[in-house]
Image (cartoon, rainbow, N blue to C red):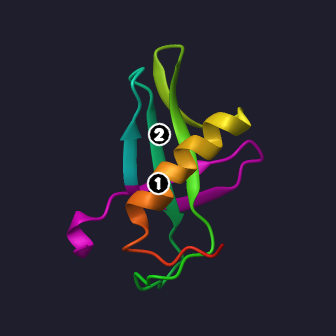
């Protein structure tokens, strides 16, 4: 992916930690719910193919504002993570 095509977002967690993440994929299920696969962006990082962690978040609306939140339900998370792993396996080396 070209540098100018990358979408980088800043996320602040519940403890106030701020990090930058690249959106590498998006999935919309049959209910119209949006899920995002994110990779942490390290300062000075080159876009490598081996990854340590893929962050999977769900888009939710709260008080009219769209937020990204962790998926609470284990079954829902596993289902979405499998979809992203399958779709991204040719781009990234996922460790088993």
Asked whether residue 5 is drawn in magenta, I would say: yes
Image: magenta residue range: 1-24
At 52% from the left and 79% from the top, the residue drawn is: 43
Disc 2 target residue: 35
Residue 2 placement (x, y as % from top left): 22, 74
Numbered circle sitting on residue 68:
none
Image-quadrant location for residue 96: bottom right
- In front: 19, or 31? 31
At 62% from the left and 67% from the top, the residue drawn is: 53
Residue 63 placement (x, y as % from top left): 53, 13
Q: Alpha-carbon neighbours of circle 1 within 10 Å: few (<14), some, or many (≥20)? A: many
Q: Are marks 1 and 2 in contact (CB under 8 Å)?
A: yes
Residue 31 placement (x, y as % from top left): 42, 20
Q: Alpha-carbon neighbours of circle 2 within 10 Å: few (<14), some, or many (≥20)? A: many
Residue 93 placement (x, y as % from top left): 50, 78
Residue 22 in view of the camera: no
- In front: 2, or 10? 2
Image-quadrant location for residue 3: bottom left
Q: Is residue 13 left or right of residue 56?
A: right
Disc 1 target residue: 84
For marks 1 and 2, give the one nearer the viewer.
Answer: 1
Along the polypeptide, which appears first: circle 1 or circle 2?
2
């Amino acid at each position: 992916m070209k540098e100018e095509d990358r979408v980088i977002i800043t996320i602040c967690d519940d403890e106030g930690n701020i990090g930058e993440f690249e959106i590498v994929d998006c999935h919309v299920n049959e209910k119209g719910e949006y899920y995002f696969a994110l990779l942490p962006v390290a300062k000075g990082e080159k876009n490598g193919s081996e990854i340590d962690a893929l962050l999977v978040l769900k888009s939710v609306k709260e008080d009219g504002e769209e937020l990204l939140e962790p998926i609470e339900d284990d079954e829902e998370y596993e289902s979405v993570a499998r979809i992203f792993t399958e779709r991204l396996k040719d781009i990234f080396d996922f460790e088993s």
